[in-house]
């Protein structure tokens, strides 16, 4: 593709997991990918590998979002993937700091980055993919903080769709189930690798690449089509 026709995507949380896999899949399809996250060393390696651009971004920090917005040019696709879970405590034992981090990262992070880029996405007849979770529709014991945050992302996605459907912007939520990434459960359990690994033992697991396939599919659909939501789980997770 020539420079003028190459489409551009920004993927948040791109230093690992679903974000990194999505960036690789999009680049393989010819997209220029801005890979954004806090850890610049990892991003620079990935950017070099896929011919993209590394952007340091902390979605919880408005100044950082503003700086990223200034560093990125025209944009056709935003993948709001940054997010995560902390803790598996009951409501009685809820850790307020964990809840605040989950809301700030998953919900407010999605809001900050969306607002920073939506005008230029609309200008290019572009699209936004919000990475939610099955936890955004299925409550589970110990999940309240993460459930609330991902229900929030699901609501955000639906309202954004309502508010922009008469404009040239497509809006999709991808809700993955259990995806065995190197970091999701490690972050949730504060670095306890045994607890993290146990989540994925003796069950079927999706890979980050499985989810990236749906990102790539949505990204390449014709512009009159809007996929509101995709829910993807391993066969043994309901
Ligand atoms: C995480 C999905 O199924 O591992 O977003 O709780 S699950």
Image (cartoon, rainbow, N blue to C red):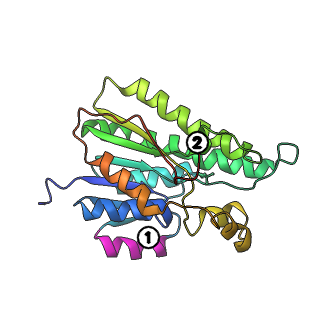
Please provide percent x and percent y for residue 165.
Answer: 35, 25
Q: Residues within 10 Å of mark 1 (few under 14, many from 20)?
A: many
Residue 75 shows up from this direction: no
Q: Mark number for residue 154?
A: none
User: Which quadrant of the rendered structure holds the N terminus?
Assistant: bottom left
Characterize the local packing of mark 2: few (<14), some (14-19) or many (20 or more) Cα atoms within 10 angstroms: many
Kindly check if marks 1 and 2 are in contact, taking CB atoms under 8 A apart as contact: no
23 or 217: nearer the viewer: 217
Q: Check if residue 45 falls in the magenta segment.
A: yes
Q: Residue at x 68, y 40 (%)?
A: 139
Q: Read off the magenta span.
A: 40-51
Residue 73 position within the rendered picture, expressed as x and y whole percent measured from the top left: 29, 52
Q: Secondary structure at mark 2?
A: helix
Is the CB of mark 2 within 8 Å of ligand 1?
no
Residue 73 showing in the rendered view: yes
* Alpha carbon distance from label 1 to label 2: 23 Å
In this figure, which residue is indicated by the disc labeled 1?
A: 43
Q: Which residue is mark 2?
A: 107
The location of residue 229, given as percent across then percent down, is 44, 37
Observer-nearest of 143 and 83: 143
x and y percentages locating residue 172 in the rendered image:
41, 39
Front one among 217 and 56 = 217
Horizontal side, residue 161 vs residue 192: left or right? left
Q: Is residue 89 left or right of residue 65?
A: right
Which residue is at a point 37% across and 51% down the rendered structure image? 214
């Amino acid at each position: 593709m020539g420079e003028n026709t190459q489409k551009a995507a920004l993927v948040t949380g791109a230093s690992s997991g679903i974000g990194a896999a999505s960036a690789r899949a999009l680049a393989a399809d010819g997209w220029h990918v801005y890979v954004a996250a806090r850890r610049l060393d990892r991003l620079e390696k990935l950017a070099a590998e896929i011919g993209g651009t590394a952007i340091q971004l902390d979605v919880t920090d408005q100044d950082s979002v503003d700086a990223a917005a200034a560093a990125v040019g025209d944009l056709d696709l935003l993948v709001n993937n940054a997010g995560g879970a902390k803790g598996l405590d009951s409501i009685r034992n809820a850790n307020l700091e964990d809840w605040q981090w989950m809301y700030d990262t998953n919900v407010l992070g999605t809001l900050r980055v969306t607002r920073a880029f939506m005008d230029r996405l609309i200008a290019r007849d572009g699209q936004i993919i919000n990475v939610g979770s099955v936890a955004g529709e299925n409550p589970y014991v110990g999940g309240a903080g993460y459930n609330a945050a991902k229900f929030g992302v699901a609501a955000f996605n639906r309202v954004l769709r309502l508010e922009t459907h008469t404009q040239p912007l497509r809006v999709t939520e991808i809700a993955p189930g259990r995806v065995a990434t190197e970091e999701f459960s490690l972050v949730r359990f504060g670095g306890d690798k045994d607890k993290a690994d146990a989540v994925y033992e003796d069950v079927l697991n999706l890979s980050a690449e499985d989810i990236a396939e749906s990102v790539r599919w949505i990204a390449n659909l014709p512009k009159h089509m809007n996929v509101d939501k995709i829910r993807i789980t391993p066969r043994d997770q309901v």
